Image (cartoon, rainbow, N blue to C red):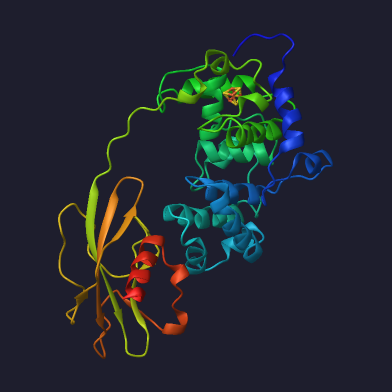
Amino acid sequence: MRDSPQFNLSAELLDWYDRHAREMPWRVGPADRAAGVVPDPYRVWLSEVMLQQTTVAAVRDYFTRFTTRWPTVQALAAAPDDQVMGEWAGLGYYARARNLLKCARVVADKHNGRFPDTYDALLDLPGIGPYTAAAISAIALDRPETVLDGNVERVMARLYDIHDPLPGSKPVLKERAAALTPELRPGDYAQAVMDLGATICTPKSPACGICPVQTPCLARAAGTQPELPKKSPKKPKPTRFGHVYIAQHPNGAFLLERRPDKGLLGGMLGWPGSDWSETPPEAPPFSAEWRALNGEVRHTFTHFHLVLRIWTAPLPEGTEPDGLTLLPKHDFKPGDLPTVMRKAYDMWRGQ
Ligand code: SF4
């Protein structure tokens, strides 16, 4: 960043945030905060867990549904697992939903329903890593913690014209971000940098002409902002293959399985199926007149692409194989399935 004695970056950014803060259902805006409204750590925590690996737009409706149904951490802690997993369906990364429940129960049982108020104690809770602990500390408790998400990384890399690629450059970017965090209004400041990255210092075509911190920005001066931050090349994702089996009883009931708690889609309801591997898999869960549907379901997880073949059969009378659940038609809600399983259902329904 360029030295500029007249330029106070955090003050300029806070001033900009006061006028342009994004409205979000979990956020206490700068005017409300100035009027003494204190953010609810439960809502901050829930939003931060939901926002990992996804966008504000994708999370809004989930957040509203969760907080309408479970307005407090105690209410969430008391909710049955399958209802929470059902509400989470479609958000992905299902381990987060399981940890969400574990964390809610620890806060309800061991902390009297109040989130702890130090970074270290937050870090001890299930599913809370350094990023989320810093975000709750800064946003809910107004502590000067450094919240380093993708937006903040991009803003720091550009302000300081840092060309070392991510993820290796994270510690340097964090150091820079920490050095800029003010003692006054650190919670608003953390959100201001994130908003700047999300709305002005965007990955493509940053709007430098209207940026409140354009004066000291080194990348803008050098013309390198479009190429920052640099990223180490990613390894190509492998493709795995699998089969799922959709069987329906003449009375409309479906045969489903609850996936094991550990592993991908853990704890979610899905169609019985094979393992997902790079070699084609084993036999169906029971013998029936299986028919393959035309086409395949394709889905991409963090570490691999998945190609699924879908098979269907009428469920022979009296069949209920071990470990599977016959779910009556009126209890079956496609929206409770994780996205890949819902894609399989949609294909089945279309044929
Ligand atoms: Fe980003 Fe441009 Fe602002 Fe620099 S001047 S922080 S590159 S938007």
Pick the quarter of the image with the C terminus: bottom left
Image position, residue 16 (x, y; %): 73, 30
Q: Residue furthest right?
A: 35
Residue 194 higher or lower than 321, as above or below: above
Q: Residue at x 41, y 61 (%)?
A: 339
Depth check, front residue: 216 or 182: 216
Instruction: Estimate the x, y position of residue 307 in percent, counting from the top left.
Output: 26, 57
Q: Residue at x 26, y 90 (%)?
A: 318
| Residue at horizontal 18 percent and vertical 82 percent from the top | 289
Q: Looking at this view, is 138 or 307 the one in front?
A: 307
The quadrant where ligand 1 appears is top right
Q: Does residue 111 appear left or right of residue 205 in this picture?
A: right
Q: Is residue 83 left or right of residue 302?
A: right
Return the x and y of residue 334 as percentages of the image width and height: 44, 72
Residue 149 appears in the figure: no
User: For the N terminus, which image quadrant?
Assistant: top right
Q: How many marks?
A: 0
Residue at 63%, 44% (x, y): give it: 116
The answer to whether residue 94 is visible is yes
On screen, 182 above or below 270?
above
